[in-house]
Image (cartoon, rainbow, N blue to C red):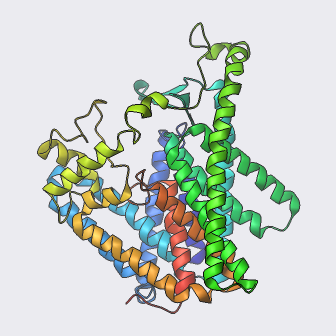
Amino acid sequence: MKRFFFLFKLYFLIYILLAFNAFVNETVWMHYAAVVLIVGGIVVLVCMMAQFTVYKKMWNIWLIAAFLGSYVLSSLLTWHYGFTDNIKEMIWLALAMVALYASSYVYTAEERKREFQILAAVYAAVCTFFNVISNSMILWGREFGISVAIDDQVVGYKVVGFKWGRLWGMYDDPNHGATITVAAILLTLYLMQIVEKRFVKIILALTLVVHFCYIMLSDSRTGLVALGTGVFVWAAVQSYFHWKEKGYSPRRSAAIGVLAGLLLAVSLIGTAYGCKKQYNVLDKKLEVILPKIFPNRNTGKKQVSGQIGRKQDLKSDATNGRLDIWESGLEITGASPMCGVSFRNMTAYAEENLPETYLIHNPENAKYDSLHNSVMDILVSQGLIGIVIFLLLIGNTIRLMKKKIYAIRGEDRTFLTACFAVMAAMGAGSLFLSMVFYLNAPQTYVFWLCFGYFVVMLGEGDTVS
């Protein structure tokens, strides 16, 4: 059964990374791949249910069950706006919050580490492949796009490559591409710490450069927030334990750790902005050279600019529309405060009950189906009930950390630090981009995978109270 769990997670990982690759995610075979994933996931859930007496002891599992139950309630109360999509949403939520989170509960500590190493290596390798191609599109992919066709009829157009002052690359969205890449950076740092061969460490270090360049070229502030948070946590925790072993007091070790984390995070973010400025200087030369190298990519008399930045877009609204979207979310919450309107019925509910709200009535003529903030997504989707369960989940996890943080074994420290750093980075990014909850994305996958490892390793022998 453990081997099947691992194969499911590996398949899930490859599928979800491909699902965010704009070049393949609309293909027919991806729809078949999704069916295989769902069937495999249901088998995993059934196997776990067969061992209910074991899994019911896992920390947080009853709160997760309550959260899923709250979503079912919200879906039932709004079934007339749509029901099928919410069934799909429940499946994806269960796969992430139960299958990924809880399946490692029956593993040994070494089995968890071995599984994580393999999954981390696959995640990092696939993202490196994507980002090498994505970075090269700064040269040949300006104003690039993909036509979406159904039955040989063009029904849409997807932006990829470089457009509007940002590198999209192979991803559907530069913010998603950047946060996916942040997870790749943190997983690569973990692999660098556990491998022994210097040659492998050098290769991994080079991939970090590739990933960092993509984040910088994507001009994603959400990506930089996630990256800064992840490296802050990583450096702070590692530094804390280092100085504590040197004989420093816990308080002094913590102070040094926080300072080290802040310095590293600020330095990385500053480096990204510095590199962006240097690239923009270089791009002026590229605009002269590229038409000769890629004449077919010249969309006019002048080579399309590859300048990174969105000064004009952000000048009038530094939040890029997020405040308006969040205000719209509060309006929906005011109309249905206790149970919410379910995530998949958010737009339909707003159209019928709040036709003037920004979510569906905006200058872009867009109909938003998320709120670019996971906490707001929960509030709108599951109301105050969902938010209370969410806060209890956070509080209960903090309680576990307070109980067990000082009892971490030295051989588990790097593993737990990596998991916590990934969780923190994805959590920080989710404050400005809908992920972790509801969205079936690589960031959601890696968050719940690491959350499960983290809780199990800390809480072995404990049950939720």
Taking the spot 70% from the left edge, 21% from the top edge, the residue there is: 286
Asked if residue 112 can be seen in this view, the reply is no
Q: Position of residue 262 (x, y in %)?
A: 61, 61
Where does the C terminus fall, quadrant-wise?
Answer: bottom left
Q: Taking the image as drawn, is residue 256 in sight?
A: yes
Q: Who's the residue at 15% across and 39% down the image?
A: 355
Specify whether 251 is left or right of 37: right
| Quarter in which the N terminus is drawn | bottom right
**Residue 351 in the image: above or below residue 148:** below
Query: At 57% across and 84% down in the image, what residue appears?
Result: 405
Marker count (numbered): 0
Rendering coords of residue 301 (x, y %): 59, 6
Residue 239 coordinates in the image, percent (x, y): 69, 73
Figure check: 166 above or below 176: above
The furthest residue to the top: 301
Residue 243: quarter of image:
bottom right
Query: On the image, which quarter does residue 202 sit in?
Result: bottom right
Q: Nearer the viewer, residue 333 or 56?
A: 333
